[in-house]
Amino acid sequence: MPFVNLQDKLGVNIDKWLLAQSGEQPYKRTARCHAFEKEWIECSHGIGQTRARRECRLEFEDFYECMHRQKTHKRLYEMRTQKEKLMKEGKYSAPDHHTGKEEPRP
Amino acid sequence: MFGIGIGVLVFGYWRLFKWNRERRRLQIEDLEARISLLPLLQAEHDRRTLRMLRQNLEEEAKIMKDVPGWKVGENVFHTDRWVTPLNDELFNLRPAEELLHKKFGFQWYV
């Protein structure tokens, strides 16, 4: 019942702690996407859903990217395939530190 | 005879509990040593991360030279903040064995 804020009336916190990653966490450990989620929530708080979709699109996309990393993985995949293609054609040879022959440093 | 057996048992338990408490004290000492060295370990880890990112950037510039429409070192996020790189990103151009070591190397048992 969203219009009857029962949890605040009774002063209990049954599931509000579950709602956002940026909330209070045990042992104060932060989520990986804490900053992105906080930015998005702060941007889209108070304005309605329609306005939030329009105005907070960048923050939301950053948050989504942090969670799912689709763009990152796609980029890495393209780099890897291009590298393998070049290596097969013989135009590129990987430097030492990328073939496991790097000398161990601290 | 039961008395002797139970006596031996109880004596064994008492020794175990004492030694376990001693082990707990020793473990706390190890953890305290690690806490005091944390700045050094964090700094080393950060330097390593930055070094790997720099190497990846240079290799990326070489590899993707001829690919049309590719911006080297393009940030996938719209923000300027520092985003901790994923293990996948750091070990992308290295042999897959190194990524496996990074991910699962601390497990001593299967």
Image (tube, grey):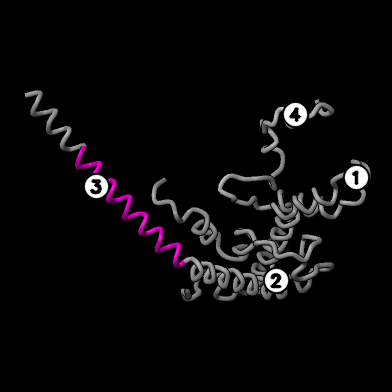
Q: As shown in the figure, which amino acid type bears the numbered disc 4?
A: Lys
How many angstroms separate mark 3 from mark 4 (CA)? Answer: 52 Å
Q: Earlier in the sequence, mark 2 or mark 3?
A: 3
The x, y position of residue A31, in whole percent, is: 64, 50
The x, y position of residue A9, in whole percent, is: 75, 29
The x, y position of residue A104, in whole percent, is: 46, 74
How many angstroms separate mark 2 from mark 4 (CA)? Answer: 57 Å
From the image, state whether disc 3 or disc 4 is nearer to you. Answer: 4
From the image, state whether disc 1 or disc 2 is nearer to you. Answer: 1
- For label 3, the crowd category at 10 Å Cα-Cα, with few meaning under 14, some 14 to 19 and many 20 or more, is few
Residues shaded magenta: B14-37
**Badges 2 and 4, same chain:** no
Q: Residue furthest left?
A: B1
Q: Earlier in the sequence, mark 1 or mark 4?
A: 4
Look at mark 3 in the image and give the residue it sits on. B19
From the image, state whether disc 2 or disc 4 is nearer to you. Answer: 4
- For label 1, the crowd category at 10 Å Cα-Cα, with few meaning under 14, some 14 to 19 and many 20 or more, is few
Give the main secondary structure, helix, strand or loop, of the magenta stretch. helix
How many angstroms separate mark 2 from mark 3 (CA)? Answer: 55 Å
Numbered disc 3: secondary structure? helix
Q: As shown in the figure, which amino acid type bears the numbered disc 2?
A: Glu
Mark 1 falls within which chain?
A: A
- Which quadrant, please, contains the N terminus of chain A? top right
Mark 3 falls within which chain?
A: B
Instruction: Report whether A8 appears left or right of B50.
Output: right
The x, y position of residue B95, in whole percent, is: 55, 63
Look at mark 2 in the image and give the residue it sits on. B60
**Badges 1 and 4, same chain:** yes
Instruction: Report whether B7 appears left or right of B29.
Output: left
Which label sits on residue A9? Answer: 4
